[in-house]
Image (cartoon, rainbow, N blue to C red):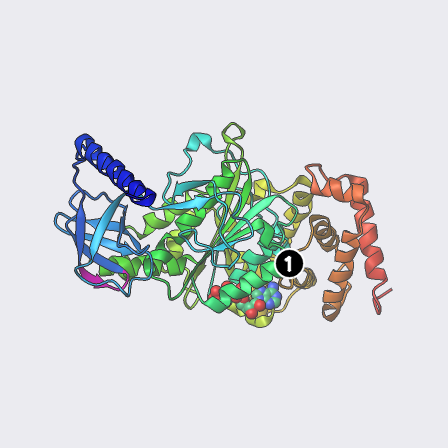
């Protein structure tokens, strides 16, 4: 026998001995595995039988990376909300339990990325470095862990910071008819967070692809992506994915909040979210209620927004400010979803289509907007100038309504209206141009001191710009004082007014 035949023989003997030993030591691992079958499929929903042990909200797998959430758990059948592309599934396909609930990857690799609610990257920039997985549904922080809202979240929009201020940890609803500038307000606020150590999450819910592409392009153009995460579902995604998007985005935010960071989350918009949930509920044959929404429609939004808060320093001290957006129809604020959200949130910013048509942008209707907690969070220097403005503006709006009916006005009323028109002109602001706190204070101070009153209305845009620029050029020490928690000193006030007056005097064609 030659050497290679000998080698083959010994290999064979060794393999046979291993096999024999394996057979002798084999202990069969017997266990049961629940395996269900799809019985029916409809848009975004599968009815599954044969999974008697499945829990509510448990994740089930359809193979090929398609998952679903067990939504309706009945005795012999479960209704599953599908989370991915499901067109290849058919009745009779196998379904497996996973034993876990829906979760999302979180980690420091997320800022700068565009992802879907399952945590998959959509920006073509490769895999995302993540550190943990968090369930998408988590209990809101208990009351005892919450701190009062005392720190402002500056939006950079004069009309909001002055009249409807928002604090860190607040939930401020943005609502209005379609195309009234709702997204623009949220995006401008995100742009203003540059350098303020606020991480922003923009959650696009059932949006048009072009609208989302525009938002991402704006964030990139303003170098804002490095402190932003975009969580995205488009209009043609399965309704299940649209439904989980805000919860997944909030879990991502909570991961950073637990590290003591301040966050801003924008849900754009919850009308699409409510509609996706209504679609799922009707397909699952849950009883419809008002406007065909299911009975728990209030709860799906309240449990989401309850997660926004400011934590006490002992609990990490982070904050999560929420800007939910809602689209109204024909300015109907008393429809079901708007009233629900108005009652859940700590205030609302209402955008009026008539102001939009008049070119008063941002088209915020101050009379119908409110901030229930943010006023306490304004910096002292800012509060000193904004307080008087609110009163003057409210008086103006009241008188303006009378003046529309051709009422004859006395000298004082005319002066109030003229002054109010100048306030409105000063509060106008272009998109994507946030104004710093010192510049805002300068403009507001000039307003309440009446420096703009002699300026003709057609010159107001130039006059406001000149004063704003003077505010940007204030000495650094003064800017720091205005930005900080100090009160406005008398000499600072005088210096700012003098600078604003000088800027107006140098305006070409200004009255001497
Ligand atoms: N302050 C502003 N100055 C100038 N243009 C603005 C301003 N705010 C919004 N716009 C313009 O108004 C249009 C509508 O804005 P936006 O998309 O933010 O509205 P929306 O209410 O979010 O719309 P949708 O109903 O589609 O969600 C956009 O073309 C935007 O550029």
**Residue 100, placed above or below residue 503:** above
Q: Position of residue 486 (x, y in %)?
A: 71, 36
Image-quadrant location for residue 408? bottom right
Camera-nearest residue between 174 and 415: 174
Q: Quadrant of the C terminus?
A: bottom right
Mark 1 lies on residue:
222
> Magenta segment: does it hold 41?
yes
Image-quadrant location for residue 469? bottom right
Which residues fall within the magenta stretch? 39-44
SS at badge 1 = loop
Camera-nearest residue between 241 and 373: 241
Residue 287 in view (yes/no):
no
Q: From the image, give the main secondary structure of the stretch colored magenta.
A: strand
Q: Is residue 455 left or right of residue 254?
A: right
Image-quadrant location for residue 335? bottom left
Camera-nearest residue between 175 and 426: 175
Q: Quadrant of the N terminus?
A: top left
Q: Position of residue 252 (x, y in %)?
A: 46, 45
Q: Position of residue 510 (x, y in %)?
A: 83, 66
**Residue 44, placed above or below residue 196:** below
**Residue lying at 71% horizontally and 37% vertically, measured from the top left:** 487
**Residue 455, placed above or below residue 10:** below
Query: Label 1: how many residues lie within 10 Å, few (<14), some (14-19) or many (20+)?
Result: few
Residue 115 in view (yes/no):
yes
Ligand 1's quadrant is bottom right
Residue farthest along the left direction in this orientation: 76
């Amino acid at each position: 026998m030659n050497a290679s035949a000998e080698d083959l023989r010994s290999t064979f003997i060794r393999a046979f001995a291993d096999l024999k030993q394996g057979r002798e030591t084999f202990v069969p691992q017997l266990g049961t595995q629940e395996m269900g079958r799809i019985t029916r499929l409809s848009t975004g929903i599968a009815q599954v039988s044969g999974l008697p042990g499945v829990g509510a909200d448990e994740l089930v797998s359809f193979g090929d990376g398609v998952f679903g959430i067990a939504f309706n758990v009945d005795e012999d059948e479960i209704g599953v909300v599908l989370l991915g592309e499901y067109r290849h599934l058919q009745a009779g396909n196998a379904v497996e339990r996973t034993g876990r609930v829906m979760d999302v990857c979180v980690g420091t690799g997320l800022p700068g990325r565009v992802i879907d609610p399952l945590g998959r990257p959509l920006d073509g920039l490769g895999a995302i470095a993540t550190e943990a997985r968090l369930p998408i549904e988590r209990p809101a922080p208990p009351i005892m862990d919450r701190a009062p809202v005392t720190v402002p979240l500056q939006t950079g929009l004069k009309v909001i910071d002055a009249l409807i201020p928002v604090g860190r940890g607040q939930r401020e609803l943005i609502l209005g008819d379609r195309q009234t500038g709702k997204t623009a307000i949220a995006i401008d606020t995100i742009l203003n967070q540059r350098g303020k150590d606020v991480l922003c999450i923009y959650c696009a819910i059932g949006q048009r692809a072009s609208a989302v592409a525009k938002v991402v392009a704006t964030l990139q153009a303003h170098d804002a992506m490095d402190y932003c995460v975009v969580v995205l579902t488009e209009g043609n995604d399965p309704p299940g994915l649209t439904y989980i998007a805000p919860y997944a985005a909030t879990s991502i935010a909570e991961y950073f909040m637990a590290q003591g960071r301040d966050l801003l989350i924008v849900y754009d918009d919850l009308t699409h979210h409510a509609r996706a949930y209504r679609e799922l509920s009707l397909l699952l044959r849950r009883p419809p209620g008002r406007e065909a929404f299911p009975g728990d429609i209030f709860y799906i939004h309240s449990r989401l927004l309850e997660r926004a808060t400011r934590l006490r320093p002992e609990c990490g001290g982070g904050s999560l400010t929420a800007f939910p957006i809602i689209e109204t129809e024909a300015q109907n604020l008393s429809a079901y979803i708007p009233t629900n959200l108005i009652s859940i949130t700590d205030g609302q910013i209402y955008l009026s289509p008539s102001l939009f048509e008049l070119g008063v942008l941002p088209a915020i209707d101050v009379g119908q907007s409110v901030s229930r907690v943010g006023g306490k969070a304004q910096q002292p220097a800012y509060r000193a100038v904004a307080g008087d403005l609110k009163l003057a503006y409210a008086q103006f709006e009241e008188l303006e309504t009378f003046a529309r009916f051709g009422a004859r006005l006395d000298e004082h009323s005319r002066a109030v209206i003229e002054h109010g028109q100048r306030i409105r002109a000063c509060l106008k602001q272009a998109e994507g141009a946030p104004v710093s706190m010192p510049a805002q204070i300068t403009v507001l101070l000039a307003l309440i001191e009446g420096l703009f009153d002699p300026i003709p209305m057609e010159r107001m845009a130039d006059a406001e710009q000149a004063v704003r620029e003077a505010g940007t050029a204030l000495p650094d020490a003064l800017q720091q004082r205005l930005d900080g928690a100090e009160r406005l000193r008398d000499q600072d006030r005088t210096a700012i007014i003098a600078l604003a007056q000088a800027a107006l005097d140098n305006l070409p064609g200004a009255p001497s």
